[in-house]
Image (cartoon, rainbow, N blue to C red):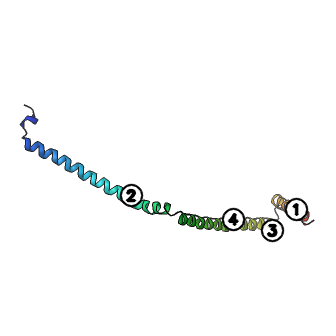
Amino acid sequence: MNEHDTQSPSSSESTHSKKAEDKIEELHKLTNRIANELERSRIAQYTELLNRPWKLIGLNLLSGAARGVGIAIGFTFFAATIIYVLQVLGALNLPIVGDYIADIVRIVQRQLELNTY
């Protein structure tokens, strides 16, 4: 006889119900984890926003304007830093760099003279 034959029907049923309870518990934990992930991803707010197109357009306009202002400020800071570095290098009167900067200044002055006529 094998061991399945020695088990009573009630012990087989209890083992089966125990496995079912374990699977239900595992499914419950998985469902809770998925629910928590969805809550963290704020999917409800996103779908609500998609159902209100004017609010979505307003938020996109606001974020685009903020991004544009940020780019303008960043570029201004970058350009000012480059100009400052060029002025410092020009004041050092380095032979190669000084000539290069002088050429740039002459080109800009010629362009300005041509544009004024």
- Give the x, y percent position of residue 111: 88, 62
* First reached walking from the N terminus: tag 4 or tag 1: 4
| Mark 1 → mark 2, Cα distance in angstroms | 60 Å
Closer to the camera: disc 3 or disc 4? 4
| Mark 4 → mark 1, Cα distance in angstroms | 23 Å
* Residue underneath mark 1: 111
* First reached walking from the N terminus: tag 2 or tag 3: 2
* First reached walking from the N terminus: tag 1 or tag 2: 2
- Assign a secondary structure to mark 3: helix
* Residue underneath mark 4: 75
Q: Toward which corner of the image does residue 66 lie, by quadrant?
A: bottom right
Vertical position of residue 33 compared to residue 4: above or below: below
The amino acid marked with disc number 4 is: Phe
The amino acid marked with disc number 3 is: Ala
Q: Toward which corner of the image does residue 73 lie, by quadrant?
A: bottom right
The amino acid marked with disc number 1 is: Gln
